[in-house]
Amino acid sequence: MPLYNKEKEVARAIISALAQSMSDFELIVVDDGSTDSGPKIVRGYRDPRIRMELQANAGVSAARNRGIELARAGLIAFLDADDEWHPNFLMTILDLALKYPECSVFATSYYIANTKTGTRRAVLRGLPPNFREGILQGYFEVASQSDPPLWSSAIAVRGAAIRAIGGFPVGVATGEDLLTWAKLAVEYKIAYSIAPLATFWEPEEMSSRPGRVPAVPDRVGEELAQLIDRRGSAAAAGLIDYVAHWHRMRGVIFLRLADSRSARAEFEKAMCLAGVRGRLLALFLISLMPGPSARLFYETMKRMLTFRVTRA
């Protein structure tokens, strides 16, 4: 559990861990230089399974990597300090590991909660009909059209696998987890349950703000492209669509920030990878407008489409 200034949420996360139906685990909390009372709250739990390590602020990837380094178990799960597990999460993960020993990644679906908009299940598209549990084939195809099927508080990885790919990329502020899951998906098999057994608590402002300015240079995009090169384009169709999806997401954020030029560059990259498709072409055409006009047009169209879906 990486911890940085989460004094209002960390108790919820710890309580959810201690409430697991499987009790044989250690909880390593890595405090990443918090300046609030979060570490004091953690120390208030007198459970011998909880260990806390302190480090100077170095980012969430460095905190997770420190936890991986200290972990004594062969199976490592992750829980962000503002999220929560449901009581059967760890038991389900262990069950997946026992049923599918050929896999190195184990995960479940999850809920997405927001104090303003309520709670919904993560949307998963592209799974086989009637899929409930099993080896997740076509991870990148699913990830390209869904909420992320792998999410940082609903996943466990064999320690040898996460160490083999070098852990989480230090110095990447956004998308570090998506890049890590992509590297794992290229190298290892994934066992998956569609049961939603964790909850991702969105920050209250997350649904209304454009998002932080995408990083330049785009290290995540660059390393995802390297994965395509490693697999070869003939074997990486789903991965290619996934990288295009990454650039489309960046382009949308640039649109919402009224930066048409940067948005256009991202949509061009996406079309070079995935081809000229209807939605991508529409976004590209919007990006030809001046920044404020492009942002207004995009937000208006998004509201209209949401209204139509809701009415339908």
Image (tube, grey):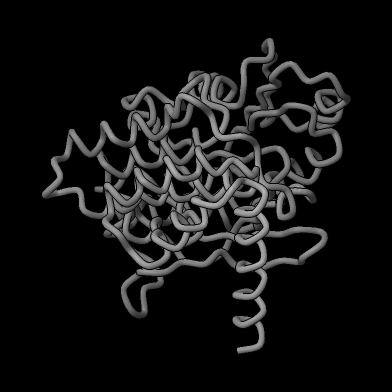
| Residue 90 visible somewhere in the drawing | no
Please tell me how many numbered marks the rendered image carries. Answer: 0
Q: Is residue 55 visible?
A: yes
Is residue 57 or residue 20 the one in the foreground? Answer: 57
Q: Residue at x 73, y 42 (%)?
A: 82
Q: Residue at x 53, y 29 (%)?
A: 215
Q: Residue at x 33, y 64 (%)?
A: 277
Q: Is residue 186 above or below residue 109?
A: above
Task: Name the residue nearer the viewer: 183 or 68.
Answer: 183
Residue found farthest to the top? 56
Give coordinates of residue 151: x percent, y percent.
52, 48
Can you say which quadrant of the picture contains the C terminus? bottom right
Residue that appears at 26% across and 54% down: 238
Q: Is residue 19 above or below residue 225?
A: below
The image position of residue 78, as x and y in percent, is: 56, 38
Seen as rendered, the residue at the extreme bottom is 312
In this image, 237 relative to 151: left or right? left
Q: Quadrant of the N terminus?
A: top right
Image height of 272 relative to 167, above or below? below
Q: Position of residue 117 (x, y in %)?
A: 77, 65
> Going by the image, does 3 lie left or right of 25?
right
Side of 115 where 103 appears, left or right:
left
Residue 297 appears left or right of 16: left
253 to 199, vertically: above or below: above
